[in-house]
Structure formats: structure tokens, C-alpha cells
């Protein structure tokens, strides 16, 4: 008789009332795979988009949502030498985190430092790795360069502010929707703020950045907003600046006349973090090694989080959807 576990089952896209917490067969690791006993799993916006059927990749129904769970390794498949049973890991699963157990590729499990708890690790997952890749790999940030982070109060944005400072950036500007929100990110290393809401962002963002950088502009922009904020940010780049697109929270996917990058010698690139886990596992390992090292040195702080029991998963998803809770939302099976 197969062992069972509790897991959220999405049976119909965009119909959460049809979803349920069900008893299903517990996973068994295949070659190259491991099973994690989930201690903490983040509730991410991308989970909500996938449940609605609006993400670019659609899982086969029924499926269990949840990226980036943390827990103990309870089983390993053939060919897996690391990690080992009993290890504490962050598992960068594409799906499966909203459950008591989750199966992932062994190559996508990252050993946690002893001083990093499961809830904090889950709160950092998908945010700090996205921020690191956008700054280091796509943005090629170097010591002393200036950075602007649009969407600085979000999970990825807040991580990018912290990492930019920890990695040696000079001036770090936080894009916020209201000046009062600057106090949320200032303790994490933001030097000043840029308003990413209001009329004529195409000019106002550029003018504010030039004011704060003595007319030079910023070297790197991390953009999780898109829309009109992108139009202003691309004009705020310094010569040879780099803008990295990580999301479109404003809703509108912007366009750009390509003579502009040529005239200013700037670069505009995008980041899809899942591809790095599949195509560049060595770089992904370096990413997490650096993040965990900076954390253990006291140079990174996990975001605030609020925990929910697994049977409260719908409450957590609804809170994410209506933005009623500002903290990271974590399920604790």
C-alpha cells in the first residue's frame, strides 16, 4: 500500500473553488531526484498566475502549486550523491511546494547554512536568487556602480536593494509608489527614492534620477514594474547602462524604439530564473552559495513573513491576491 500525504490539488485553471487539500500518493524519487519533507513553502505571485492558467507554462492538471519549499531531505533517487538524507535544503521546485512532501531534481536543492531557518529560507527563495541573477549575471554590477530598483517594496525588489549594497554598489535608489514607503526599504540599504507612480513618468523618473546622480544617470536598473515606469527608467540610464526586466507588475508590457539603445550604448535584457536552474546549474549553485554566505555574514536580512498552516492555503492565496498582507506568506505543513 502506497504512503499518502496531504497536498493542494488544482483541478481547473482559474477556479480556485474547485481546488482542495487532498490525500494523494506520496512521491517516490526517480533517478536524479530527491524528496523533501516540506517545512516551509512560500506563496508567490507566480503561483497565483499559474493557478489562473495565465502563466507562460501550464502544468498538467491536476497539479500541486508551490515553488521554492525548504525542508529535510527524506529520500534520494538513483545517482544522487548530494544532498543526502537528513540534509536541510532549499528546493527550487517548479511545482509541488503546497504539500507535506515535494520531489525535485537533486541538482536543484541547495544546502542551507546552519543559522538559516526554514521559514526564512522559504521567504528568501525565488526573490533573492532572481535579484542576484538580475544584478550579477544580467546586470553585470561592479563595485561602486549605481543601481535603481523599480518595485523596491516587493519581494524581488527588496532583495535587489539589499543585494546591491552587499555586492558593493554605490548609490542605490528605490522605486516606490509613495514617498512614505521609502522607510520600508531604507533600512536595507536604499540611499534615496524615485517615485514610480504619477503622471508623466517618462520624464519624472529621468529627471529625479539625474537630480540624485549629479546628471549622470544610473548604471543598472532592475525593473519589476514595466509600464510607464520602464519608459522613464530607460531614459534614466547612464552611458553603457544596463536595464534588466524581471516583471510587469504595472500590467502593460512596454515597447522600445531600438535606435535608443544604440544612441546611448545601453543594454535592455530580461530574466527568466527557471531557465537558469535548468540550463546553468553551476551558475545557480554559485548564486545560492553567495546569497547564503552574505546571509551568514549578517549582510542580508530575510523579509518579514507570516505563516499559515497547510489547511489555510486558500486564506494565504487570497491574502496574496488582494494584497491584504505586506509580509511574505509561508505555508508550514
Image: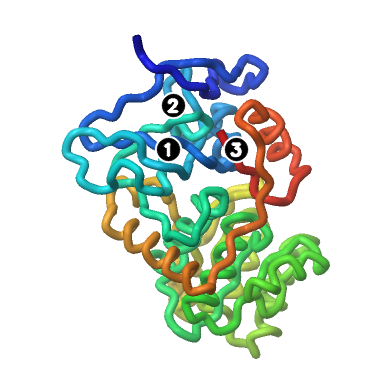
Quadrant of the drawing holding the C terminus = top right
Q: Residues within 10 Å of mark 3 (few under 14, many from 20)?
A: many
Q: Is residue 232 left or right of residue 76?
A: right
- What's the distance in space between the residues labelled 1 and 2, CA to CA? 9 Å
Q: Earlier in the sequence, mark 1 or mark 3?
A: 1
- Seen as rendered, the residue at the extreme right is 180
Label drawn at residue 331: 3
Q: Can you give x and y, in whole percent of width and height, for residue 297 in the image?
A: 48, 74
Quadrant of the drawing holding the N terminus = top left
Q: Which label lies toward us, 1 or 2?
A: 1
Q: Which residue is mark 2?
A: 59
Q: Nearer the viewer, residue 322 or 111?
A: 111
Q: Can you give x and y, in whole percent of width and height, for residue 12 in the image?
A: 56, 17
Q: Can you give x and y, in whole percent of width and height, for residue 78 in the image?
A: 18, 34
Q: Can you give x and y, in whole percent of width and height, for residue 177 in the image?
A: 76, 61
Label drawn at residue 51: none
Residue 329, located in which quarter of the rendered image?
A: top right
| Circle count | 3
Amino acid at each position: 500500500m502506497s504512503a499518502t500525504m496531504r497536498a493542494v490539488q488544482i483541478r481547473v485553471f482559474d477556479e480556485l473553488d474547485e481546488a482542495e487539500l487532498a490525500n494523494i500518493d506520496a512521491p517516490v524519487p526517480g533517478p536524479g531526484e530527491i524528496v523533501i519533507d516540506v517545512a516551509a513553502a512560500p506563496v508567490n505571485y507566480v503561483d497565483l498566475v499559474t493557478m489562473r492558467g495565465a502563466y507562460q507554462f501550464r502544468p498538467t492538471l491536476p497539479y500541486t502549486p508551490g515553488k521554492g519549499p525548504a525542508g529535510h531531505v527524506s529520500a534520494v533517487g538513483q545517482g544522487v550523491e548530494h544532498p543526502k538524507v537528513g540534509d536541510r535544503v532549499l528546493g527550487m521546485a517548479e511545482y509541488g511546494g503546497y504539500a507535506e512532501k515535494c520531489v525535485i531534481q537533486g541538482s536543484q536543492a541547495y544546502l542551507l547554512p546552519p543559522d538559516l531557518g526554514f521559514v526564512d529560507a522559504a521567504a528568501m527563495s525565488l526573490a533573492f536568487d532572481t535579484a542576484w541573477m538580475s544584478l550579477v549575471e544580467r546586470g553585470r554590477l561592479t563595485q561602486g556602480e549605481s543601481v535603481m530598483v523599480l518595485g523596491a517594496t516587493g519581494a524581488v525588489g527588496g532583495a535587489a536593494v539589499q543585494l546591491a549594497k552587499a555586492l558593493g554598489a554605490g548609490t542605490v535608489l528605490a522605486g516606490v509608489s509613495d514617498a512614505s514607503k521609502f522607510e520600508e526599504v531604507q533600512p536595507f540599504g536604499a540611499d534615496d527614492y524615485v517615485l514610480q507612480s504619477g503622471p508623466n513618468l517618462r520624464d519624472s523618473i529621468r529627471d529625479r534620477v539625474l537630480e540624485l546622480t549629479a546628471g549622470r544617470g544610473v548604471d543598472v536598473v532592475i525593473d519589476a514594474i514595466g509600464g510607464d515606469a520602464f519608459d522613464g527608467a530607460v531614459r534614466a540610464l547612464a552611458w553603457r547602462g544596463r536595464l534588466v526586466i524581471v516583471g510587469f507588475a504595472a500590467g502593460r508590457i512596454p515597447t522600445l524604439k531600438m535606435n535608443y539603445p544604440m544612441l546611448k550604448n545601453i543594454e535592455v535584457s530580461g530574466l527568466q530564473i527557471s531557465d537558469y536552474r535548468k540550463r546553468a546549474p553551476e551558475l545557480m549553485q554559485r548564486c545560492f552559495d553567495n546569497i547564503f554566505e552574505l546571509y551568514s555574514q549578517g549582510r542580508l536580512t530575510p523579509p518579514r513573513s507570516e505563516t499559515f498552516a497547510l489547511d489555510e492555503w486558500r486564506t494565504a492565496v487570497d491574502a496574496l491576491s488582494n494584497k491584504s498582507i505586506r509580509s511574505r506568506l509561508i505555508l508550514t505543513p
